[in-house]
């Protein structure tokens, strides 16, 4: 399966999982403390894991301005996308300190977003290397 298809299905499945956690599982309060903590950080962890996959799915093969910034052709581009994604995650979390939005700031969200991005950097990097090796063989 080609990397764009893997990215597409990863983003779709991950989004459905995040929605299930946020709108079905968490409101039912099914789990006690260790489980409820994981359900609290899971959307950030999984969402940040999906950043490179989403960038590759949406921007590969396109040539407009935003696609040039988020192009994922090599490890440098992957690193840039992950750093920009982390910056946006941190800004989003600090914007939650403004009471108008009605959300709460949580340092654990930043911490586990960074864990998700590091894991995604490793996994997507390995997939990208495997893709480049198979394209060289043909």
Image (cartoon, rainbow, N blue to C red):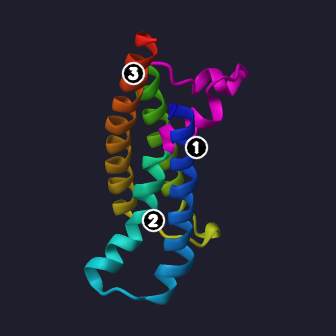
- Our reading of the magenta stretch's main secondary structure is helix
Sequence-wise, the earlier of marks 2 and 3 is 3
Q: Secondary structure at mark 3?
A: helix
Residue at position x 53%, y 53% in the image: 92
* Apparent side of residue 133 relative to residue 60 in the rendered image (left or right): left
Q: Tags 3 and 1 in contact by the CB under 8 Å rule? A: no
* Apparent side of residue 77 relative to residue 33 in the rendered image (left or right): right
- In percent of width and height, residue 48 lies at 45, 49
Task: Measure the alpha-carbon separation of dots 3 and 1.
Answer: 20 Å
Regarding residue 95, the answer to whether it shows in the image is: no
Residue at position x 32%, y 41% in the image: 118
Regarding residue 85, the answer to whether it shows in the image is: yes
Q: Which residue lies under the disc numbered 3?
A: 75
* Between marks 1 and 2 in the image, the one whose residue lies nearer the viewer: 1
Packing grade of label 2 (10 A; few <14, some 14-19, many >=20) is some
Residue at position x 48%, y 54% in the image: 47
Please, which residue is most extreme toward the front here? 138
Task: Measure the alpha-carbon separation of dots 1 and 2.
Answer: 30 Å
Residue closer to the observer: 17 or 80: 17
* Between marks 3 and 1 in the image, the one whose residue lies nearer the viewer: 1
Sequence-wise, the earlier of marks 3 and 1 is 1
Q: Which residue lies under the disc numbered 2?
A: 105
The dot on residue 8 is 1
Q: Which residues are magenta?
A: 51-75
């Amino acid at each position: 399966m080609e990397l764009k298809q893997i990215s597409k299905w990863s983003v779709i499945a991950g989004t459905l999982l995040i929605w299930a956690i946020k709108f079905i599982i968490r409101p039912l309060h099914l789990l006690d403390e260790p489980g409820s903590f994981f359900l609290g950080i899971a959307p950030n962890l999984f969402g940040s894991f999906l950043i490179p996959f989403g960038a590759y799915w949406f921007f590969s093969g396109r040539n407009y301005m935003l696609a040039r910034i988020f192009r994922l052709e090599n490890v440098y581009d992957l690193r840039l996308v992950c750093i920009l994604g982390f910056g946006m995650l941190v800004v989003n979390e600090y914007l939650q300190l403004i009471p108008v939005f009605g959300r709460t700031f949580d340092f654990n969200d930043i911490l586990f977003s960074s864990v998700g991005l590091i894991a995604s950097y490793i996994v997507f990097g390995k997939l990208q290397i495997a893709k480049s090796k198979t394209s060289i063989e043909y």
